């Protein structure tokens, strides 16, 4: 059985690593992107089960 895919979009590397570590330990396939535009492209390509978005990012916010 495939692991559920979580797309994490976070521009702070420390937060991203921490969240990715915890979710991976809990059995999820975590895909990370560090900005809104790359996150948007990955969401379209990967069609993840869950999106975890930072709201305040330069360029394209989590709300957009």
Image (cartoon, helix red, strand yellow):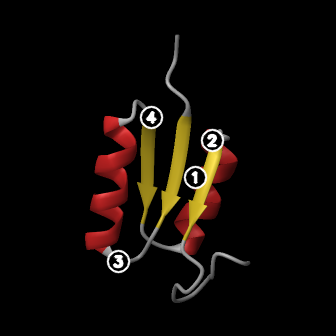
Asked whether the beta carbons under mark 1 and mark 3 sit within 8 Å of each other, the answer is no
Q: Earlier in the sequence, mark 3 or mark 4?
A: 3
Whole-angstrom CA distance, mark 4 to mark 2, is: 11 Å
Point out residue 6 in the picture as x, y percentages from the top left corner: 53, 44
User: Which element carries disc 4, helix, strand or loop?
Assistant: loop
Which residue bears the numbered disc 2?
48
Asked whether the beta carbons under mark 2 and mark 1 sit within 8 Å of each other, the answer is yes
User: Which element carries disc 2, helix, strand or loop?
Assistant: loop
Whole-angstrom CA distance, mark 2 to mark 3, is: 21 Å
Q: Earlier in the sequence, mark 2 or mark 3?
A: 3
Which residue bears the numbered disc 3?
12
Which residue bears the numbered disc 1?
42
- In the picture provided, is 64 more to the left or to the right than 48? right
Label 4 crowd bin: few (<14), some (14–19), many (20+), radius 10 Å: some
Label 2 crowd bin: few (<14), some (14–19), many (20+), radius 10 Å: some
- Picture residue at 69% right of the left edge, 49% below the top: 44
Which residue bears the numbered disc 4?
28
């Amino acid at each position: 059985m495939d692991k559920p895919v979580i797309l994490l979009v976070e521009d702070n590397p420390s937060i991203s690593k921490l969240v990715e570590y915890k979710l991976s330990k809990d059995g999820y396939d975590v895909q990370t992107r560090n900005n809104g535009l790359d996150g948007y492209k990955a969401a379209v390509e990967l069609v993840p089960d869950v999106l975890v978005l930072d709201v305040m990012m330069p360029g394209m916010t989590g709300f957009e």
